[in-house]
Amino acid sequence: MAKRIDVSGLNAYYGAHKAIDDISMTIEPRSVTAFIGPSGCGKSTFLRTLNRMHEVTPGGRVEGKVMLDDENLYGSGVDPVAVRRTVGMVFQRPNPFPTMSIFDNVAAGLRLNGSYKKSRLKDIVEKSLIGANLWNEVKDRLNKPGSGLSGGQQQRLCIARAIAVEPQVLLMDEPCSALDPISTLAIEDLIGELKERFTIVIVTHNMQQAARVSDRTAFFNLAAVGKPGKLIEIDETERIFSNPSVQATEDYISGRFG
Ligand SMILES: Nc1ncnc2c1ncn2[C@@H]1O[C@H](COP(=O)(O)OP(=O)(O)OP(=O)(O)O)[C@@H](O)[C@H]1O
Ligand SMILES: [Mg+2]
């Protein structure tokens, strides 16, 4: 199996509290992997260990290995800022920079790393907005503030901002949970298109969404409140939703869950 991300023996802590325990998994290139599981089982925490965002939280600490192709993201000498450029993130609530124009929102990451030719900026912004399926809706108002867009448009703007820096992996933490059903479908369609270029990991509480958008699904669970979350199983999405190996997965996806 081709690998893009290969996680082994990963633990994450908040101070003394161990939030996730001994997670190992492989994520294939150009695929969508969904993370599902009950609240508090560590989905967001684990997602943030994949681009070294977890350690930004006070007390946040990680043990274990995350290989992106041939590089351990936690290896000595690895620059976390560079990791976050390679492994981009889209959050639950659309978070465009409110005072910035639509154009500047998309350009923000590029300007920050300064790794582009000035003459190409307009092209990259346009390409990213096209890639995020937002171009037609905003091409006549690129200089208006990003905060003037609808929630679904703002989320697509954040996706445009994330893909403008050409990451290899895109992490999405419940990207549709603040959106209406139409915007949700627009984002799901977009995920289907983006996976041809990027490796995508999405956290979702919406079982239909996991079934619709992902190739593989990982189910996380925790033995009891306060205990660390564990990976219970990861498999082809079709299999997880039709014939999972573990009873707890079956109980969770069928809604029989305490
Ligand atoms: N900033 C933090 N400080 C301390 N503990 C935290 C922090 N963020 C999360 N935790 C704890 O870590 C554990 C995992 O939380 P996490 O947010 O990763 O779960 P989740 O699966 O994403 O839940 P949800 O589905 O509700 O988003 C929980 O016990 C949570 O209380
Ligand atoms: Mg979460």
Image (cartoon, helix red, strand yellow):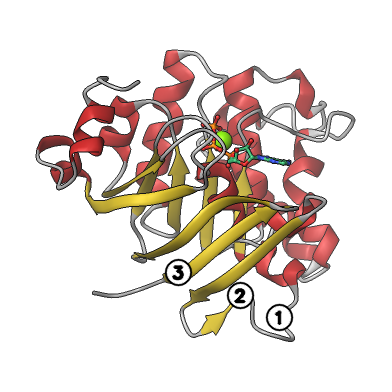
In the rendered picture of this protein, how many numbered marks are placed on residues? 3
Judge: label 2 CB < 8 Å from ligand 1: no
Q: Position of residue 131 (x, y in %)?
A: 51, 46
Locate residue 77: give its quadrant.
Answer: bottom right
Q: Amino acid at mark 3?
A: Val
Instruction: Look at the numbered disc 3 and give the secondary structure of its residue.
Output: strand
Q: Residue at x 19, y 33 (%)?
A: 250
Locate residue 186: give its quadrant.
Answer: top left
| Mark 3 residue crowding within 10 angstroms, few (<14) / some (14–19) / many (20+) | some
| Residue pointed to by mark 2 | 73
The disc, 3 or 1, on the residue closer to the chain's N-terminal end is: 3
Q: Residue at x 52, y 47 (%)?
A: 228
Q: Nearer the viewer, residue 74 or 59?
A: 59
- For the residues bearing labels 1 and 2, Cβ distance under 8 angstroms: yes
Q: Nearer the viewer, mark 3 or mark 1?
A: 3
Height in image: 210 above or below 31?
Answer: above
Height in image: 77 above or below 241?
Answer: below
Q: Name the quadrant of the C terminus.
A: top left
Q: CA distance from mark 3 to mark 2?
A: 10 Å
| Residue pointed to by mark 1 | 78
Say which mark, if any, is on residue 7.
Answer: 3
- For the residues bearing labels 3 and 1, Cβ distance under 8 angstroms: no
Height in image: 207 above or below 193?
Answer: above
- Please give left or right for residue 196 compared with residue 44 in the image: left
Task: Point out the quarter of the image occupied by ligand 1.
Answer: top right
